[in-house]
Image: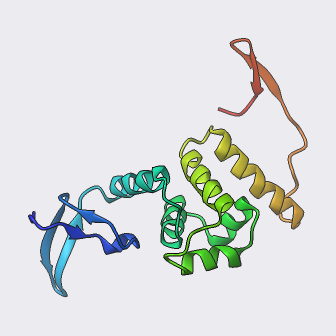
Amino acid sequence: MSSKPYHYRESGLDYVYLQNGFTYHETPYGKGVSIFAADQLHEAIAREIVLSPRPLRGQEARFLRSLLDISQADLARTMGTTRISITRWEKNRDGELPGTADTALRLIYTGNGDKTSLVKRTMDMLRERDDAAHGRKAPKKKITLKTRGGVWDTARAA
């Protein structure tokens, strides 16, 4: 461990510093750094980004998209924009995203973790709709519903 904070540039964000949770070590190529529980660290960073009242910038858009593990084209389809727009936003690291894009990306990230969330299901539907519009898949034509505890819901395979 080190008493000096580590500037975590590997995140792609220019303002993330770690107080602990990292160790320096020697490698055949020089000094290296190991980060403890990097996936959890990335989720904590994303949580801070999404909950911040500050407008999202290009570098945050890229970071969140990379955590979603989707391409620029997939994000563009989900947001109803073009891949070129996503590329422009990400390339302009300090440029603010347009208001609706900012809101959409925060909601997409927030709702994507829970596979049953309405946001996740809506994202999947938008991708399916776009795929169908471009001849990639036939849209679903059957809806099956059932009651659970007196409430109607879609019957899905468990």
Q: Which residue is at a point 62% across and 79% down the rendered structure image?
A: 88
Q: Nearer the viewer, residue 153 or 157?
A: 153
x%, y% of residue 74? 68, 65
Residue visible at 54% across and 59% down?
A: 68
> Quarter holding the C terminus?
top right
Looking at the image, which residue is at 14% across and 71% down?
A: 24
Residue 18 vertical placement versus 48 (above, below): below
Q: Residue furthest top?
A: 150
> Which of 129/15 is in front?
15
In which quadrant will I find the N terminus? bottom left
- Give residue 124's position: percent from left, percent from top: 71, 51
Q: Is residue 119 above or below residue 59?
A: above
- How many numbered circles does the render carry? 0
Q: Is residue 156 above or below residue 140?
A: above
Taking the image as shown, residue 5 lies to the left or right of residue 122, namely left
Q: Residue at x 60, y 49 (%)?
A: 107
Q: Quadrant of residue 77?
A: bottom right
Asked where in the image residue 30 lies, by quadrant, the reply is: bottom left
In this rendering, would 37 be left or right of 113? left
Residue 17 is situated, as x and y percent measured from the top left of the image, at 26, 65
Q: Is residue 74 left or right of residue 13?
A: right
**Along the horizontal axis of the image, is 107 left or right of 81?**
left
Residue 138: x and y in percent read 88, 55
Q: Residue furthest front?
A: 54
